[in-house]
Amino acid sequence: MLPLRPPPSTLLSALLLLGCDSRPAATREAQPAAVEAKRVTGETNKTGDAPVAAAGPVVPVVAPVVPVVPVVPGVPGVPGVPVVPGVPVVPVVPVDLEALKAELLGEHGAAQRDRVVRGVDQVAKLWRPEDGDLAAFVREQFIADAALLDATFARLEAVFEQIEGHTHEVGREVRRASDVDVGPLLPVDPLLAAYDPGARMIEDLFTTKVGFLVLLNFPLTTLAERDEQGPGYSRREWAERRLAGRFGRRVPGEVRQAVTKASAEADRYVSQYNLWMHHLVDARGARLFPAGLRLISHWNLRDELKGRYGDPEGLARQRLIVTVMERIVTQTIPAAVIDNPRIDWDPITNLVTAAPADSVEADAPARPVVLDNAREADVRYAQLLAQFHAARREDPFVPLAPTAIARSFEIGRELPEARVQALLEQVLRSPLVPRVAEVIVARLGRPLEPVDLWYPGFKASGAPPEAELDARTRARYPDAEAFARGLPKLLTGLGFAPARARWLAEHIRVDPSRGAGHALQALRRGDFARLRTRVGAGGMDYKGYNIAVHELGHNVEQVFSLETVDHTLLAGVPNNAFTEALAFVFQARDLELLGLKEPDAASERERVLNDFWQTWEIAGVALVDVATWHWMYAHPEASPAELREAVVGIAREIWDRYYAPVLGGQGTPLLGIYSHMISYPLYLSDYPLGHLIAFQIEEHLHRSGALGAEFERMASFGSVTPDVWMTHATGAPVSAEPLLRATEAALAAL
Ligand SMILES: [Zn+2]
């Protein structure tokens, strides 16, 4: 969970990240999952939140419906196909596809009809004039013979493992000095880290026609098709769909770069959005926060709010933070106060004054003292619109998922939007919400208000003091080497058989990390998963150990899902939420592995209630994010000011529907505060999904009792759709019920 912040947009960031800092590389499917992947990166840096799911690139698959007309959206002059201004157009290939199909059917027989129609259409949709003679290629490369098709499939599977595995290794090695503590960084290291050996991989496979051979002979599928027919697919059929899925889109480099650029700019905007808290004043001119406290929105603001529960004056401070957040969302914040400790600001009246010289921090950045009260224009929403306009340029090149929203749900997560929405609403509407709220009221001794959206008071008790834990971990793990030697013991402690534990440890290499730690998978057999962990001079402290155990969970999943899966094309798990959930299985047992006793029932109840409250909180935030994107697609010409009004309206409406009955604060736009909405749009749904998936896996493991064997069975199944994976793992599709059941039980036992 804490993080390493990888560089923007490279193969590694495109292929390898997780909600924590681990980075399961994975170029298995569509390489252009770049955008989704990148989102994950940024996240990791700033949220210390619990289970994090993730958008992404672990195994996205593109999958198409077979269109009857060989036409791509965005083509001028084609009725019903809108041309979006500024959006590049995919050229139409001047070939009579119907005649070509008829010719192939004449040659290969009617039994090949479905394959011919599908294959020719799949090729035609992504073929460009510079690719040459489409008809000649199709005649030459269509494979009707079953034995030849089998041999071709096997060849491609073997070769892709090598291409992707070695490319991934090159990417890992160019970043090695940046990620691993190998001594002082050289000036060349950041340049190397930005080199992306996989950036052109998919395009090169298209230009060499390998990609077209795949599209001609293997089926792309929509998520709807996989959901409907997936439970009946053979393993080979799944693997074929993952193979074709790599070539479901062909996005021109300049379009991808525009997305990367918009996203990097939004990230920069967000990462500089600080408030100097000592310079917030109340109506009497009193300063409620200490000098020097500089907080980034929204992460630090939220965490400061959470940290003020024990403070006798906390509520006034928390309310002030909420007012600041509301002013950021409505963009009524005075522009001059952003990251400026030279101006005092009363967020309630919104008046600004020059900060007295003796109140200005010694490390204050040079900033003009502008006292005109001009608001921050609508920069926040201009950034979001720029992301939208860039994403929309990609739409015509992904025929099966022609909006950013569809790509996020159908390619990134492989869960339909409607289903995710239903899962979130199930939590939001749960009758357990007011019951958990009553517990909080009783503990706080006051009615709830909007600040309590972030109530952090469900906490395990009885854990030894951190200093004692530090002493234990330092003694056991004086350096990264010692942690590596200790892997078999950790793994047998978790319930893996001794031989299996040794085998796993042999497939994992431990490196000293520059950052807090991360896990990096291998993509070909014969390579090793990497566990990067930070060990201080005095040995591994407890925090580092806790992270390392989490990362070990990733590595073990990575080893099983590559080495023991029956098709390497299926290596991996459905999406990042799953690998995060599996990593949390390990992390939750870290104290037991140190020889301390398991958490008692009371601690377990607190953990459940905490997760429930966090899931409830972030579910609404996720709905605002998605609704905002629907609004932008419905109003593509909107101005930043119009977008602001829309987002404020959406946030208020969702608050009033689900939160006001519990927390009051009718009409607050607070749910619009998350910075992810601006810099990593459409990512937030992964948080609540991550909680649900983690609970479902944990419930199953508790029931089965055989952690080692069950973990292996689940992780070896590979990258099928989430519901197929979860049904194999636990007997039921992805569901909110395990979290709700656990919450009900925790409430009953209080
Ligand atoms: Zn993780």
Image (cartoon, helix red, strand yellow):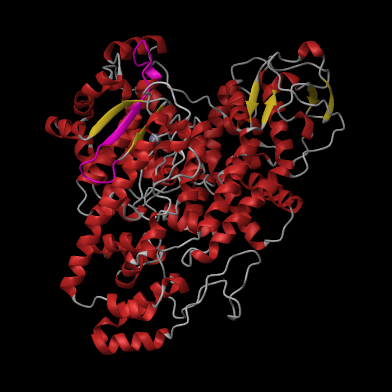
Of all residues, the one furthest to the left in this rendering is 499
**Residue drawn at x 55%, y 46% as measured from the top left:** 622
Front residue of this view, candidates 286 and 482: 482
| Residue 572 % position (x, y) | 30, 48
Q: Considering the image in quadrants, where does the C terminus appear?
A: top left
Whether residue 702 is visible, yes or no, is no
Magenta stretch encompasses residue 718: no
| Residue 8 % position (x, y) | 50, 41
Magenta segment range?
Answer: 522-543
Front residue of this view, candidates 727 and 748: 727
Position above or below: 166 against 233: above
Magenta stretch encompasses residue 524: yes
Whether residue 42 is visible, yes or no, is yes
Q: Considering the image in quadrants, where does the N terminus appear?
A: top left
| Residue 462 % position (x, y) | 39, 15
**Residue drawn at x 46%, y 46% as measured from the top left:** 37
Position above or below: 80 against 596: below
* Left or right: 343 in relation to 604: right
Ligand 1 located in image quadrant = top left
Quadrant for residue 569, please give it.
Answer: bottom left
Position above or below: 680 against 392: above
| Residue 206 % position (x, y) | 38, 64
